[in-house]
Amino acid sequence: MGNHQDTATDQKIQEELLDILIKVKPDLKRDEIQNDTRLETLGVDSLDLVEIIFGVEEKYDISVPFNANAGSGDAEMFSTFGNVVEAVRDLISEQNHGVDGQLANSVS
């Protein structure tokens, strides 16, 4: 059961992220964007990435911890479309389950 829920959630997130990506890059076509598609091959530059991150934060009411100067970790999170879907899914899950906030506070 959990797997079906995750798949449905991933598909919903994928569709919503496609909407955000196409809003930022209107010349893109949905059928040319796959999970393994590298954002740089779609012509997504650093300014576009910031717009995408703002779109994600606004859509899901989450904070995306991204620092373009931080090195490979953050960059890898946004290297492919599939990585973006996974990162957003994980951030939503963390927010919904209070991983960073409630659990951390209850330990201290």
Image (cartoon, rainbow, N blue to C red):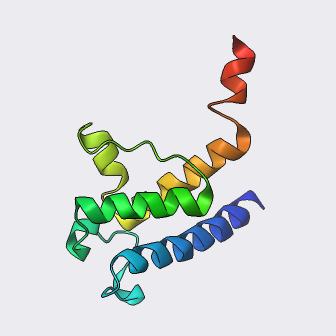
Depth check: give the residue in front, 54 or 18: 54
**Residue 32 image-quadrant placement:** bottom left
Q: Is residue 36 shown left or right of residue 92?
A: left
Placement of the C terminus among the 4 image quadrants? top right
Number of numbered labels in the structure image: 0
- Is residue 20 among what the camera can see? yes
Residue 65 screen position, x and y as percent? 44, 42
Q: Is residue 51 shown left or right of residue 59?
A: left
Q: Which residue is rendered at x = 26% and y = 61% of the image?
A: 47
Depth check: give the residue in front, 3 or 38: 38
- Is residue 85 among what the camera can see? no
Q: Is residue 23 shown left or right of residue 105?
A: left
Check the image and name the residue furthest to the top: 108
Q: Which residue is rendered at x = 49% and y = 78% of the image?
A: 19
Q: Which residue is rendered at x = 39% and y = 67% of the image?
A: 81
Q: Is residue 22 above or below residue 81?
A: below
Q: Which residue is rendered at x = 47% and y = 47% of the image?
A: 64
Q: Is residue 75 above or below residue 31?
A: above
Placement of the N terminus among the 4 image quadrants? bottom right
Q: Is residue 77 above or below residue 16?
A: above
Residue 16 screen position, x and y as percent? 55, 73
Residue 12 screen position, x and y as percent? 62, 72
Residue 61 screen position, x and y as percent? 61, 54
Q: Is residue 99 above or below residue 8?
A: above
